[in-house]
Amino acid sequence: MKEVNLPTILIVVSFLLIILNFIFTSDEMNSGFWFRIISSVVLILAMFLTIRGRKNKIDTT
């Protein structure tokens, strides 16, 4: 059960960090800002695919 919860927790934390990044950013949004946003989105996608893969693995066994 613990293995299933960790990716979900990481997804929630990533969403919170993205929102906080938009709120507390200065008026100037340079490339570093967008690279942080893109890396967070990629992390969320990776965790989503991990959860989906584990569920498929559990269902087939």
Image: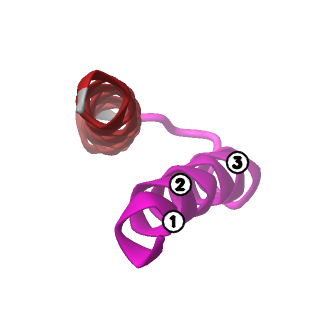
Residue for point 51% across, 50% down = 11
The extreme right residue here reads 23
Residue for point 47% across, 70% down = 1
* Element at label 1: helix
Q: Give percent across and percent down for residue 31.
A: 26, 32
Q: Is residue 15 magenta?
A: yes
- The residue at which mark 3 appears reads as 19
**What segment carries the magenta color?**
1-29
Label 3 to label 1: alpha-carbon separation: 21 Å
* Foreground of the two, 46 or 33: 46
- Which quadrant of the figure has residue 55? top left
Q: Give percent across and percent down for residue 25.
A: 61, 53
Residue for point 40% across, 31% down = 48
- The residue at which mark 2 appears reads as 8
**Residue 25 left/right relative to 23:** left
Label 2 to label 1: alpha-carbon separation: 5 Å
Closer to us: mark 3 or mark 1?
1
Q: Earlier in the sequence, mark 3 or mark 1?
A: 1
- Which quadrant of the figure has residue 51? top left
* Element at label 3: helix
Mark on residue 5? Answer: 1
Label 3 to label 2: alpha-carbon separation: 17 Å
**Cβ–Cβ under 8 Å for marks 3 and 1:** no
Mark on residue 20? Answer: none
Circle 2: residue type: Thr
